[in-house]
Amino acid sequence: MSRTLRRAAVPAIVIAVLCFVVFALLRSAPKRSAPPTPDLEAAPVRIYGTVEPAGGPVYVAATVSRSVVSVPAREGDTVAAGQPLVRLESAVESAQLAAAVARAEAAERAWAIRRDAFRRNAELFAARGISEVEYSESRLRAELDSATLTAARAEAGLARARLDQLTLSAPAAGIVYKLDVRLGQTLAAGDDSRIVTGPRCQQVRLFAESFWLGRLAVGDRYHVLDSETGRELGFGRIASISPYVGGRTVRTEDTGERFDAEYGVVILELEGVTGLPLGLNVAAEVLP
């Protein structure tokens, strides 16, 4: 009987010891509580964006696909409005313009001759030197030659416009920020990624998550930092805040950024800062 009791007692003792150990561990373990809700009003505002020319970059694209025959500008050049940046192959358009100009000049000479003849016939008709039929015929021929001249001039103007399209020029005074074009290569129509111009003054296009927007105001002054190295680049003031929010497609160095969040666009005017690389990812920060 005693042996049976001992055999039954061993499992009970083991179970009791295990329960005691588990209970002791639970008592000694630190109690976990839910993390406190972050106080956004006390946290520093830090938003990310990219450097661009003041007013936004100006992209230059070809209207037709052609090979490059001349690149009279370079990256970093200061250019005036209308200054040539790239010239494309234009032999056909040059020949078409020459032919159109020749036709316009011939039409102008024909019109001058017909105009003088009509003036003489008008005088003769007034003096009853010719019949009304002859006068009307002279007038109609003069009107026809005038219409032919107008059409020839329009054709020459169109040919000149086609030729001018093959010289890609600066749309406004500013800086050539990017000119990724080489002699002999084909520049595709509509490719606006190769040539970028804009004013020398620069700004930062920031993307602020919607929960920061309530703490931003036009005129606020911010530190501008290189988002990758943390190096301070200067200061800027908020010039405008977009009245709408939406998604974003520009990625920055912020490892915690969320692409599913709603963002508002904030334009930060840089103060005395120039020469930053276009497209540089930066952070703007202000302490509470």
Image (cartoon, helix red, strand yellow):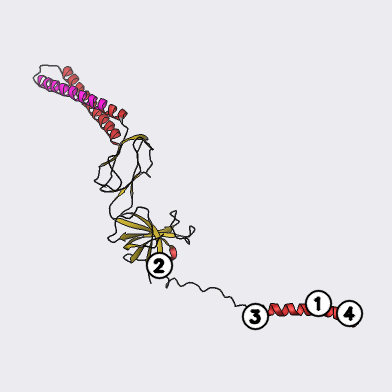
**Mark 1 or mark 4: whose residue is earlier in sequence:** 4
Pointer 3 residue: 27
**Residue ID at (85%, 78%):** 7
Amino acid at the residue labelled 1? Pro
Relative to 159, residue 7 above or below: below
Relative to 62, residue 23 above or below: below
Task: Give the structural element (helix, strand or loop) at label 4.
Answer: helix
Question: Closer to us: mark 4 or mark 3?
Answer: 4
Residue 143 rendering spot, x and y as whole percentages = 20, 25
What is the C-alpha distance between the residues marked 1 and 4?
12 Å
What is the C-alpha distance between the residues marked 2 and 1?
62 Å
Q: Is residue 173 left or right of residue 21?
A: left
Question: Closer to us: mark 2 or mark 1?
Answer: 1
- Label 3 neighbour load within 10 Å: few <14, some 14-19, many 20+: few
**Mark 3 or mark 1: whose residue is earlier in sequence:** 1
**Residue ID at (81%, 77%):** 11
Dominant SS type (magenta)? helix
What is the C-alpha distance between the residues marked 3 and 2?
41 Å
Image disc number at residue 4 = 4
**Mark 4 or mark 3: whose residue is earlier in sequence:** 4
